[in-house]
Image: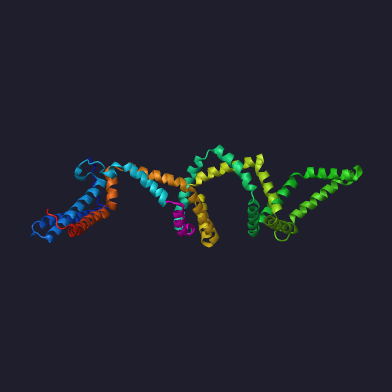
Amino acid sequence: MQDSPPPPSPLDPDDALRRGLRRHRTAANGLLAGMGGLLLGSYALPPGYGTDLLQAAAKAGVVGGIADWFAVTALFRHPLGLPIPHTAIIPMQKERLGAGLGRFVANHVFTEAEVSRVLSKVDLARVLGDFFSDPEAVQPAAAALANSLPRILASLEDGRARRLLARLLPRLAGGPGAARVLARALTALIEGGRHQEVFDLAVGQLKAVLAAKEDQLQAAIAARVRAEGGALVGWFAGAGIARRVLSALNAELDRVQPGDSDLRAAFEAWIRAEIHRLETDPERAAAVGRALREAVSHPAVAGWLMDIWGRLRTALEADATNPNGRTVQALQSALANIGTMLEGDEAARLRLNRGAERALIALLPRARSQLSEFIAGVVRNWDTATVTEKIELRVGKDLQYVRMNGTLVGFLVGGVLYAVLTAVFGRVAG
């Protein structure tokens, strides 16, 4: 017993298809019934060549219409409910049809050439740029990313994350781009005037060290004077020289003020020279990369970085759930910056589009296999009545035209065939 299709709902998206199929099926049935009526009516006409021609044509039309009705009906159900072999093809072969449909879509629709053709017409980078440049669109996206951050961090096993960072940080710090990143950071430091704060911090720390170690420094200087000038000179002048040296050093440090110190000017000139060397001297850039790699690989620095990772993780988990928190604001700002960059940098857009195309094509073989299995699984899980109805609604109208064409073509061919045979062999008595 065939499952009956579910009744249409008031908001059924296939309702228009269902009404169209009903109209065309009625037209095909009406044409077949009309052809049968024409056949029966021809027997009421007076005998003659014209009557015989009409009867032969009508007979062929009825036979053609019935044959095509049988063929069309056999695709979806048993004709007249009779279990005739090789009928109800779609319900009986649902799984095979689903697998074949999946393979066809995966291998003949999602091809590399077709995907490349479609992607060449879609400027993905511009779409993303427009999206990221819209504050109303970026804010929910940033909030969603921030909300997912705790789950992402929770999925990272802490020890594994630490080991991964321990391997990656030295490579990143000592990579070819490390010198360029350092040069940009120093440039931003100077342009913002923050290098003066660094200089002030260094001077303050130096003064603090001198104050804390004054006795030891005096003893060290006196010992050096004795070593160079002899015990007698050291006994008379060692302590005095030490006090004068430290006093002169402290006085010089006290005179260091922003904008009016030769030492500050020398410090800024040194930084600018280092920036130039980092940007233009490959050997200097490589030396800086090696130094950074060795520094980051040092156990003490590595331990410090791991401590920073732990603190950062805790802070991110606490702040990510706050819609007005720094994490959301940082993500929103980062997405907006990406949008601005994509809008103004055509080369960046081109690189993004090409990268997306290469990534999708690289994933295509595996995606095709999964797509084929997905389509086959969807069709397999449909009930028989549903899959039969869905296919019939989408091709049934055309199949009703096949029925109408079969009826009309049978009528015409039957008439032509009768006329030709009669002309060649003469009239044959019925």
Front-lying residue, 6 or 161: 6
Position of residue 342 measured from the top left corner of the image (x, y, whole percent): 52, 59
Magenta highlight on residue 113: yes
Q: Quadrant of residue 214?
A: top right
Front-lying residue, 147 or 224: 147
> How would you classify the magenta stretch by its main secondary structure?
helix
Q: Give, as a single range, the part of the protein colored magenta.
A: 110-130
Question: Residue at the location (70% across, 51% down)?
Answer: 202
In the displayed orientation, state which residue is furthest to the top. Answer: 159
Q: Quadrant of residue 313?
A: top right
Position of residue 69 measured from the top left corner of the image (x, y, whole percent): 22, 50
Question: Residue at the location (56% across, 41% down)?
Answer: 310
Question: Residue at the location (73% across, 61% down)?
Answer: 260
Position of residue 222 measured from the top left corner of the image (x, y, whole percent): 84, 44
Magenta highlight on residue 139: no
Front-lying residue, 183 or 221: 183
Q: Quadrant of the N terminus?
A: top left
Front-lying residue, 193 or 42: 42
Colour scheme in use: rainbow
Number of marks in the rendered image: 0
Q: Quadrant of residue 400?
A: bottom left
The reply to whether residue 321 is visible in this rendering is: no
In the displayed orientation, state which residue is furthest to the front. Answer: 425
The reply to whether residue 205 is visible in this rendering is: yes
Q: Is residue 344 left or right of residue 7?
A: right
Position of residue 186 measured from the top left corner of the image (x, y, whole percent): 65, 55
